[in-house]
Amino acid sequence: MNFLRLQRPRNDGADPSGSGDPNDPRRLRRNPLVWIAVLGAIVLYTQYEGGGLLGTENKGVRRIDQIHDVGGPFELTDHNGRAVTAESFYGQYMLVYFGYTWCPDVCPVEVLVMGHVIEILGTVGEQVQPLFITVDPTRDTVSTLAKYAENFHPRLLALTGREDQVAAAAAAYRVYYGKGEVANSPDDYLIDHTDYMYLMGPDGAFLEVFPHGMRPAEVARSIGQYL
């Protein structure tokens, strides 16, 4: 596996979070790349076939007969600054995850899992486009997402937009999200959000949803049945 490009936390004494106190535990949460490095190691050293992610269990796959009316039109901007719509990905399968770059734990794990799924699928994985859609457009600008995306699979596209555009995309996918309590500064907050990966067909139709905690190999096997 060579798609994960982890960046080491700086050790030059500078505080990447902007917090003046080096002992402030919030510094880790304010520097998502630290969490990417830590959680990336967990994923990389977890066997595909033996055992899921630490602290998780397989909750199974929810199929079309259990979740309905998922997916629909959206208008967003990718981390390269290009305007995209749902139709931009027609002809490909989409593996879609809604999250945000300041998410301290679950989001980076799930995006890493998406990348591993694509790698496990091999050549046929080229038919699947992994998409990360932010639920935090205020902080997740195009440039922020570009820096975030480079730490994951090279084919990952990260999408943002105006608040109304993100809200419309989330509504189409039946994704809940809500801003938590603001801490010591206006940009210091968490967001509660639905934690599923969605598989969409080449026509944009919903196929399956994968809950948090599924092993990459399990997700890849399910997707492989459609390819």
Image (tube, rainbow, N blue to C red):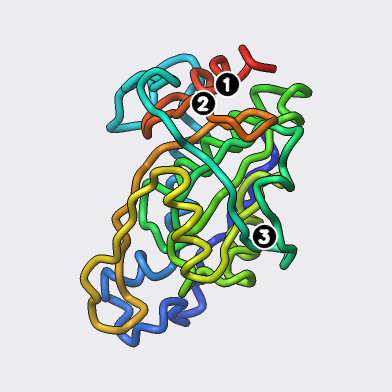
- Residue at numbered disc 3: 78
Residue 157 position within the rendered picture, expressed as x and y whole percent measured from the top left: 66, 51
Residue at horizontal 58%, vertical 32%?
Answer: 200
Residue at horizontal 67%, vertical 22%?
Answer: 121
Q: Are marks 2 and 1 in contact (CB under 8 Å)?
A: yes
* On screen, residue 91 above or below 12: above
- Closest to the observer: 126 or 92? 92
Q: Quadrant of residue 4?
A: top right
- Closest to the observer: 206 or 110? 206
- Residue at numbered disc 1: 220
Secondary element at tag 3: strand
Label 1 vs label 3, nearer the camera = 3
Residue 201 position within the rendered picture, expressed as x and y whole percent measured from the top left: 63, 28
- Give the number of callouts: 3
Q: Residues within 10 Å of mark 2 (few under 14, many from 20)?
A: many
* On screen, residue 68 above or below 32: above
Q: Amino acid at mark 2?
A: Pro
N-terminal label among 2 and 3 = 3
- Direction top: furthest residue: 225
Q: Are marks 1 and 3 in contact (CB under 8 Å)?
A: no
Secondary element at tag 2: helix
